[in-house]
Image (spheres, rainbow, N blue to C red):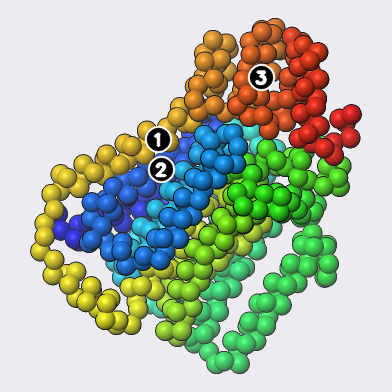
Amino acid sequence: MNMAEIEKIHKGLLLCALALTSIAVVPKFADDSFNVPKMLILVALTSSILGLMLRHQELLGIRSHNRLLIVLGTFLGFQLLVMVVSGPGILQQFYGTGGRNTGWLTYFSASLLLLSAMKTKVDSFRTLFFRTSWIVGGLSVLYGLLQSIGKDPIDWVNPYSPVVGFLGNPNFQASFVGIIATIAVAALLSSGVPVWKRAVLFAFILIALYEIKKTSSEQGFMVFLVGGGIVGYLFLRAHVRKGLILTYLFMFFGGALTSVFGLLNKGPLAGLLHKDSVIYRGDYWRAGIKMTLDHPFFGVGLDSYGDWYRRARTVEATLRRGPDVVSSAAHNVLLDLSAGGGIPLLVLYLTIMGFVVSAAICILKRSKSFDPYFAAILGAWLAYHVQSLISINQIGLLIWGWVLSGLIIGYEFYGREQDSVVEKSASKSPKVKVKFSSSGSYLIIVLGMTIGFAIAAPPFISTVKYRLAVESSNGVALQKVVTSVPIDTTALVQSSILFEKNKYNQQALELIMKANQVSPNSFEAWRVLSLLSLATPDQVAEAKAQMKRLDPHNPDLK
C-alpha cells in the first residue's frame, strides 16, 4: 500500500463519516431515532480515521500543524477537566444529554474530522466533496419534499412543521438545506459548467428555498442569504470593478442589518420576520450568560445547560410561557460552550475558529480569481456559523461546521506559495518508496472502528432496549435497562411514572430515588418524587425544597 492508496482510503472514510452521520436515523427502532445513531456512526468512523492517522502520521503530515494540534488537544483536555470538577454526571457529560448527545465524545470526534479534513489535498478532493454534498443534500431535500406533501413513510411524533428531514427538527432541516444550497450557488457560478448542469443546480436551489419555506423556519433563509451572499461577493470580486463590489457589499450588509432589526421587531421587516421565538431565544441566551458569569472557570458541566436552566432564567422568562416550559440548550453554540465549560472553553473554541479565519484571509489575499470550491467551503462555513449563533448544535449540522473548518485550513496550507519547509516536504513526499502492509492498515482501520463502536454503543443499545421494553410492557426488562450504565435520567423519570400509573408503586419509588442519586440537579426527578404515593412526608418535603432550589422563580412553588 503506497501513499496514494492511503490518501484514497483517508478521503473515503472522511466523506463516509460526513455523509452517513448526516442522514443516519433509526425510525421505530430506538427511543431516540436521530441523535444516538448519528453519534454512534460518527464515533465509529472517526475512530477508524484516528487509527489510520496514528499508523501513517508521517505520511499524512500531522506535525505540520503543531499550534492547531496544541489548541485542539487543550480544548479536549480542558473538557475532561470540566467533567471531573463540575459535579456529578460524568457519563452524561461524556456522552451528552439524551436528545442532544453533544458531550465530550462528540467533540472529540468533531476534532478528528477537522484534522482529517485539513489533510485533504484540494485538487484530488474537490470533486468528491461536491458529489458527497449533492448526494446528502439531494436525499435530504427529497425526503423533506415528501414530508411537506404528507407522504412521509414514517409517522414521526412532531408538534412542529412535518418537514424535519434526517435531523428531527424543522429548524435544523432549514439550516442544513440552506448550507447545501450555498454550495450549489458556488457550483452554479463556476466556469465551464454545461447548460444542463446549470439548469439542474438552479432548479435545486429553487426547490431548496421552497422547502425552507415549508419548514416555517426563517433561520434557513438567513443561513442561505449569508452563505450565498459570500459566494456572490467572491464571484463579483473576480469579475467586476471595485465600485460595483462596494455597491454589492453595501446592499448585502444593509440587508443583513435590516433583517436583524426585523427579527428584533424593529424596522420595515419587523412584521415579516419577528416571531415570539426570537423573544424566547433571548431568554435562553440570558440564562446561558448567567451560567457563564456564575461559573466562569469550569461552567456547569458539558451539555448540562438543561439541568441549570430553571435556576438561571429570569423571572420574566419563567412567567412568559409558564414555569414548565424549559430548554436543554442555549440556542447559541458559543453560549452552550461557555455555560457548559466556562470562559476558557469558549476562548479555546474561538481560537480554533481563529485558525480558520486566518487561513481564509490568507487565501483571499493570495488570489483574486474565483475558485468555486473555496467559495463553496467558505460560504457554507459562514452559513453554518450563522446557524450556530441562533440555534442548537445538532450533530448532523455540527459535523459540517468542523469538516468545513478543516477544509479551509487545508486549502490554505496546500495552496500556500512556495515556502522552504513546505517545498521540501512537498518535493520529498512523492518520492517516498516505502510500502506499507495493506493488511496492517486495514486491520488498524477495522480495530479503530470496532473500538469506537464499542465506546459509543451503550447509549444506542440502551435507547433500543428502552423502547422495546416499553412497547412490550415488560416491567422487569424496563427496570433493568434504565438502571444499567449509562444511566439516562429522563428514562428513569419516565419509567417511574409508568410504574406508578400501573400500580407498581415500590418500583416507581426505587427508580426515582435512583434518578435523584444520579442527577441531583434534575427538577423533573424531584417533582415526580413529590407526587409518588409511597413517598414519605420527609421525602416529599425534601423534594419540594430541591425543586425550589432548582427553580427559584417558579410561582407555583411555595
Tell whether 435 sits left or right of 62: left
Residue bearing the label numbered 2? 43
Residue bearing the label numbered 1? 455
Q: Within 10 Å of the Cα at label 1, are there few (<14), some (14-19), or many (20+) other Cα atoms?
A: some
Residue bearing the label numbered 3? 512
Question: Quick check: 554 above or below 401?
Answer: above
Quarter holding the C terminus is top right
Closer to us: mark 2 or mark 1? 1
C-alpha gap between disc 3 and disc 1: 27 Å
Label 2 SS: helix
Callout 1 amino acid:
Ile
Q: Position of residue 144 (x, y in %)?
A: 56, 47
C-alpha gap between disc 2 and disc 1: 8 Å
Callout 2 amino acid:
Val
First in residue order: circle 3 vs circle 1: 1
Question: Quick check: 487 above or below 363?
Answer: above
